[in-house]
Image: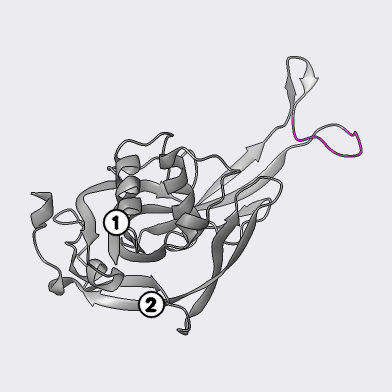
Amino acid sequence: MTVLLLRLAGPMQSWGTHSRFTERDTGREPTKSGIVGLVSAALGRGRDAPPDDLAVLRLGVRVDREGVVRRDFHTAGGGDWLGQPYGVAKASGARPETVVSNRYYLADAVFLVGLEGESPEFLAAIVAAVAAPRWPLFLGRKSFPPAEPIHLPGGLLDGDDLEHALRTWPWLVGDRPGRHEAPPDRLRLVIECRPGEEGEPRQDVPLSFRTEARDFTVRRVREEWVPLADLPKECQPCS
């Protein structure tokens, strides 16, 4: 197997799982649909492109900094613009109105994301795309750009497996755990189960990103922990 490691760090990230209309949630770690969408943007793929070859990659996430769930209060429309009512149109034809929504996000989170596949060439193509993306990359929402490069030098590991890669890569936060934050004793891992393994169901595997036919299926994940003291202090491939 070959594993590709990516870094997702930013002041704001949002990885929705059950968002509906005026309530936009976020998971505590990146979703598979979010990662597939991010890589698709790097490759320059449109919404009509089938995501099958990316969705089949096995996903693992190490939570290097959990982040804090925050809420944005949004309004859309209201009042007049250039002498005309401005807002969200109503089917009845009545005056457009203001729509209020709550949008949740993770503040100051950092994730090490691993993608495992059988083709080193395909994962190498993803490395090249992430290092020089065709389209802008963002962390779940277009207004949430990464604070650090997503590409990790030395992060393409041929002959490795997902669990080992996530358990042996140095802590991404390093000597900057936060102004008022002590380093954790251990880091949380969320690893996609292999076929036949038991785990928590997540309906976030994309079958289609087409606007008129968005569709997802289920995968299963398991949660593990790795002691921070077990991680190496330096990353030799990155030096």
Q: Residue at x 73, y 14 (%)?
A: 82
Q: In this orientation, which residue lies closer to the viewer: 36 or 92?
A: 36
Q: Residue at x 50, y 40 (%)?
A: 45
Judged left or right of residue 76, residue 80 is: right
Q: x, y percentage for residue 132?
A: 32, 35
Q: Quadrant location of residue 170?
A: bottom left
Judged left or right of residue 218, residue 230 is: left
Question: Is 197 above or below relative to 161?
Answer: below
Q: In this orientation, which residue lies closer to the viewer: 89 or 44?
A: 44
Judged left or right of residue 82, residue 66 is: left
Query: Which comes before the other along the chain, label 1 or label 2?
Result: 1
Let me know if residue 210 is in the magenta part.
Answer: no
Mark 2 highlights which residue?
A: 223
Residue with the most extreme top position: 82
Q: Which residues are magenta?
A: 87-94
Question: Colour scheme of this structure image?
Answer: one colour
Q: x, y percentage for residue 95?
A: 85, 31
| Mark linked to residue 120 | 1
Q: In this orientation, which residue lies closer to the viewer: 121 or 94?
A: 121
Q: In this orientation, which residue lies closer to the viewer: 123 or 191?
A: 123
Question: Is residue 70 in view from this perspective?
Answer: no
